[in-house]
Amino acid sequence: MASQLRAEVQALEASGGQMTASGDRKRTPGGVFWNLLKAQCTGDEWTHIFSEEKEKEKERNKRRQKERNLKDKGTLRPSLAARLGPKQPSQAQETAVDTPLTPGTKWSAVV
């Protein structure tokens, strides 16, 4: 099937290419290949082709969500915290930063 699609892509490219759905530009040869493949596959075949990648994407999303949750709790490893960037302060934290420290003020009362 792949070699047949390759021949179809080459024929389409030789005859001027294939436009995108919006018609504003031509598809790349890879885009033509995927478009032809999708047109020839059933929904179940298309799902099967991308099932492994979909599982990997789900795992990546779970890991990222877990990292965000850990970051919000402040229990993230320093190397991951550096990779994810600074935590966005909540409104309560922004107010606490503006609170002046006076002698006798406990740090926990400010934060």
Image: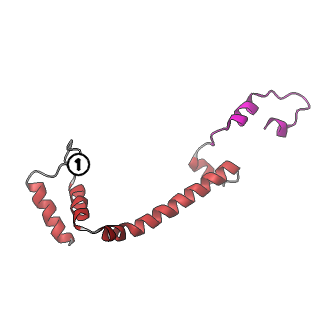
Which image quarter holds the C terminus?
top right
Residue 47 is one of the magenta-drawn residues: no
Question: What residue is shown at x 21% (from left), y 51% (from top)?
Answer: 27
Residue 107 is one of the magenta-drawn residues: yes
| x, y percent for residue 107 | 83, 37
| x, y percent for residue 20 | 22, 48
Question: What residue is shown at x 22% (from left), y 67% (from top)?
Answer: 40
Q: Quadrant of the rendered structure where residue 24 is? A: top left
Extent of the magenta region: 87-111
Outermost residue to the left: 15
Please state which amino acid type lies under the numbered disc 1.
Ala
Query: Would you name the residue on which mark 1 appears?
Result: 21
Question: What residue is shown at x 19% (from left), y 47% (from top)?
Answer: 26
Instruction: Give the SS element for disc 1.
Output: loop
**Relative to 57, is 99 above or below?**
above
Front residue of 61 and 102: 61
| x, y percent for residue 68 | 61, 52
Q: Is residue 34 left or right of residue 107?
A: left
**Relative to 101, is 107 above or below?**
below
| x, y percent for residue 81 | 62, 50
Q: Quadrant of the rendered structure where residue 90 is? A: top right
Q: How is the image coloured?
A: secondary structure
